[in-house]
């Protein structure tokens, strides 16, 4: 009895870019008067740099935010401006622009502390998130990305209780709208001038599982997913393959629903000075025994991170096999291989979003003409890496179906 050989059928992921990469694509004066112009301009820009989709950055307008821009490490852009309600007319305009540009919208991203200890501020942030949910529905987008956050006055265990009390209602609101909430796992060490390093409680697989169990008890397990960013794993001494293998072994291979494509380059000298906890004293964010009232001084709290690491835009760092083995930068090829070998994507690999998140400080250019070729190159690199991984997996399946062995061992999880 003869059997036909398995065909070569690689499955590629979709490439996107987070619009926070370029805050001033549309000048503030223009987009404040015409809020949806920012999205229109970004759709055209994304097409020109080779992106399939955009992840639209949402944030409270600078006039409404409780965090001054000078206190932030990374760019935050209110590409989605919700000072006025996003209605059917606005949705029609944005959808027409997307169709003309032939660029989709993968999801919305609003990164804020949704467990803030101040009840009034927390409500303000939650209300804004609900408006993003409603915008996603109007535009036919099925996911929103963000943080969980942390109540700074409570222990981590107490934060789990607050998650059940205050965050579950947000997930129920997502469920009623047919949405998924994807949590990016950045620990946000510089978010506060205090000594806490983990300021977003959803920072690691052990925490994701604990949170997901709470969600399951409240009927919203399907609403919580992770928007995995390998840069944060590197920051905490983790490697992607081992992390994905752990999820698989624990029965949570389904938890990751999308990806930020951003690297982290660890400075060995910085680790020698401060270790992976970063600079703990003498940063300059405290003046006279209390947090400085100057937001620019408060931004020095980020020395907890940047004293030993720097964000990488994919494709810009040197190829460094030793650094990969030491978990001091991202092995992009193995990242994509491990995702296919260890994880389960309900929507299928071809519908998974790889979103380039640009936070490499030296290349954080706000001139569109200068930034365009940088982002175009990074997206092309990421696409090529994903295609290489997809081709390798598909080819190996072909030869296995014919009884031919796959050579070698490959990278293994949990190796020291």
Image (tube, helix red, strand yellow):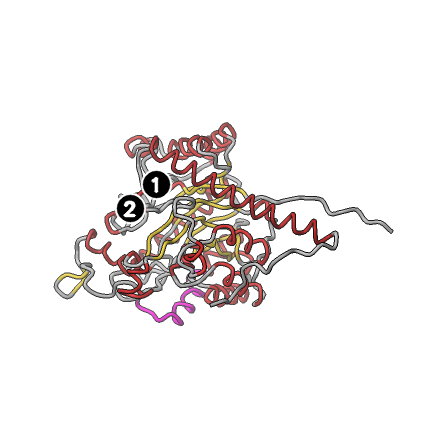
58 over 343 or under it: above or below: above
Q: Position of residue 22 (x, y in %)?
A: 35, 38
Tell which of 71 and 379 is nearer to you: 379
Q: Position of residue 132 (x, y in %)?
A: 43, 46
| Range covered by the magenta-colored residues | 153-167
Determine crowd level at label 1: few under 14, some 14-19, many 20+ residues with C-alpha closer than 10 A. Answer: few
* Residue at screen point 62% across, 50% down: 393
The single residue placed furthest to the right in the displayed view is 1
Q: Which residue is mark 2?
A: 64
Q: Which residue is mark 1?
A: 83
- Residue 158 among those drawn in magenta: yes
Give SS at disc 2: loop
Give SS at disc 1: loop
Marks 1 and 2 in Cβ contact (< 8 Å): yes
The single residue placed furthest to the left in the displayed view is 288
Determine crowd level at label 2: few under 14, some 14-19, many 20+ residues with C-alpha closer than 10 A. Answer: few
The CA span between labels 1 and 2 is: 9 Å
Q: Where is residue 42, by image quadrant?
A: top left
- Residue 190 among those drawn in magenta: no
* Residue at screen point 42% across, 43% down: 18
Tell which of 192 and 355 is nearer to you: 355
* Residue at screen point 34% across, 52% down: 124
Q: Main secondary structure of the magenta part?
A: helix
């Amino acid at each position: 009895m003869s059997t036909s050989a398995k065909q070569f059928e690689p499955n590629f992921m979709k490439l996107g870019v987070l619009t926070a990469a370029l805050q001033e694509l549309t000048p503030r004066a223009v987009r404040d008067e015409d809020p949806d112009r920012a999205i229109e301009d970004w759709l055209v820009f994304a097409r020109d740099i080779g992106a399939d989709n955009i992840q639209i950055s949402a944030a409270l307008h600078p006039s409404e935010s409780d965090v001054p821009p000078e206190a932030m490490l990374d760019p935050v852009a209110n590409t989605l401006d919700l000072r006025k309600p996003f209605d059917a007319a606005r949705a029609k305009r944005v959808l027409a622009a997307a169709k003309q540009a032939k660029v989709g919208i993968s999801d919305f991203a609003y990164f804020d502390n949704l467990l803030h200890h101040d009840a009034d501020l927390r409500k303000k942030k939650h209300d804004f998130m609900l408006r993003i949910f409603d915008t996603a529905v109007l535009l036919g987008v099925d996911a929103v990305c963000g943080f969980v956050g942390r109540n700074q006055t409570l222990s981590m265990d107490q934060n789990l209780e607050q998650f059940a009390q205050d965050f579950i209602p947000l997930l129920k609101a997502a469920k009623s709208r047919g949405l998924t909430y994807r949590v990016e796992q950045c620990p946000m060490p510089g978010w506060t001038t205090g000594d806490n390093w983990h300021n977003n409680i959803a920072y690691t697989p052990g925490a994701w599982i604990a949170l997901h169990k709470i969600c399951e008890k409240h009927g919203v397990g399907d609403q919580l997913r992770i928007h995995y960013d390998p840069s944060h794993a590197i920051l905490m001494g983790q490697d992607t393959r081992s992390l994905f293998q752990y999820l698989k072994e624990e029965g949570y291979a389904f938890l990751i629903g999308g990806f930020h494509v951003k690297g982290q380059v660890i400075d060995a000298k910085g680790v020698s000075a401060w270790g992976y906890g970063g600079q703990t004293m003498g940063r300059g964010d405290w003046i006279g025994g209390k947090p400085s009232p100057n937001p620019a001084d408060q931004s020095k709290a980020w020395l907890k991170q940047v004293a030993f690491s720097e964000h990488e835009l994919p494709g810009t760092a040197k190829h460094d096999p030793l650094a990969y083995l030491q978990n001091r930068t991202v092995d992009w090829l193995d990242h994509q291989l491990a995702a296919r070998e260890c994880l389960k994507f309900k929507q299928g690999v071809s519908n998974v979003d790889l979103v380039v998140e640009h936070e490499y400080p030296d290349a954080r250019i706000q001139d569109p003409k200068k930034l365009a070729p940088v982002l175009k190159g990074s997206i092309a690199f990421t696409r090529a890496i994903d295609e290489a991984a997809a081709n390798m997996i598909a080819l190996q399946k072909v030869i296995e179906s014919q009884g031919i062995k796959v050579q070698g061992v490959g990278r293994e999880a949990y190796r020291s």
